[in-house]
């Protein structure tokens, strides 16, 4: 990333995915060592999970999807979809770190960052349905469609949970509900089919 710079955005997203993995690893060490600072132990443990899915799987899928629709220079198109994918890719890369800052220091920053993050993920998921799925074969298209629909649902839950974190607001979703509905669907409804789609060989590469 240092030699290439911050563009193309799909490559930046993939680099960010790889850079977020050690963050999850550090959180795992802290969790297993029983070090939770001022947080509840469950929060540190869920940080481990979060940085392997929202931190690793999501930016990786974002970057791989971006590669399909960008030109040879890694640039998105100048149309509405292209601009939306470029902007949401950048938000997905940056806002995960902002959410962590908000959780640590400021509920207001957390709520705002979560709102931007969830909207960006939803817009990107819809862009996958409209721009990426038509460009891939049927099997990969079906897997990516399932992933895109699943992540829209999980982001709605994330927004509800982020809103509940602000002082004086009602608790719309509990941590237990987030683990069951948000976490499980992200793992098996989003990450698994999306990553599988990009691991599958295309008919052209198989023929070669």
Image (cartoon, grey):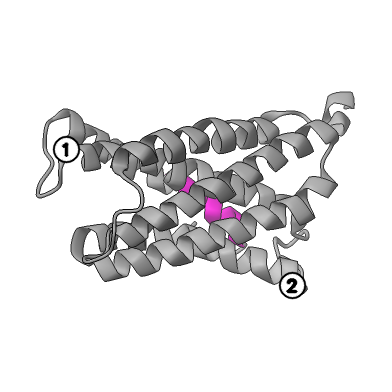
Residue at the spot x=70%, y=60% of the render? Answer: 74
Lateral position of residue 74 relative to residue 102, left or right? right
Tell me the element at label 1. helix
Which residue is the site of mark 2?
80
Q: Earlier in the sequence, mark 1 or mark 2?
A: 1
Residue 72 vs 136, above or below: the answer is below
Image vertical order of residue 132 relative to residue 45, above or below: below
Residue 86 falls within the magenta-colored stretch: no
* Mark number displayed over residue 41: 1
Residue 135, percent from left and from top: 83, 47
SS at mark 2 in the image: helix
Q: Report if residue 12 lies within the magenta region.
A: yes
- The reply to whether residue 5 is in sight is no
Left or right of residue 75, residue 99 in this image: left
User: Residue 94 appears at what percent x and percent y?
Assistant: 43, 62
Q: Nearer the viewer, residue 15 or 130?
A: 130
Residue at x 76%, y 74% (from the top left corner): 78
Rendered location of residue 56, percent (x, y): 46, 43
In the rendered structure, the answer to whether residue 43 lies left or right of residue 52 reads: left
Which numbered circle lies on residue 132?
none
């Amino acid at each position: 990333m240092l030699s290439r710079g911050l563009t193309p955005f799909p490559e930046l997203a993939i680099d960010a995915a790889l850079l977020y993995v050690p963050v999850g690893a550090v959180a795992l060490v802290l969790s297993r060592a029983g070090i939770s600072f001022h947080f509840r132990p469950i929060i540190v443990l869920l940080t481990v999970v979060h940085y392997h899915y929202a931190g690793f799987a999501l930016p990786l899928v974002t970057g791989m999807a971006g590669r399909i629709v960008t030109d040879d220079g890694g640039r998105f198109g100048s149309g509405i979809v292209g601009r939306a994918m470029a902007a949401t890719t950048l938000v997905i890369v940056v806002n995960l770190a902002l959410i962590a800052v908000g959780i640590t220091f400021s509920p207001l920053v957390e709520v705002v960052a979560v709102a931007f993050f969830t909207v960006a993920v939803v817009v990107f998921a819809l862009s996958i349905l409209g721009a990426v799925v038509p460009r891939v074969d049927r099997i990969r298209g079906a897997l990516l469609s399932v992933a895109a629909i699943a992540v829209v649902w999980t982001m709605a839950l994330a927004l509800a949970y982020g809103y509940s974190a602000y002082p004086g607001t009602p608790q719309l979703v509990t941590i237990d509900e987030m683990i069951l509905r948000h976490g499980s669907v992200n793992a098996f409804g989003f990450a698994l089919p999306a990553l599988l789609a990009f691991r599958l060989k295309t008919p052209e590469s198989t023929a070669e």
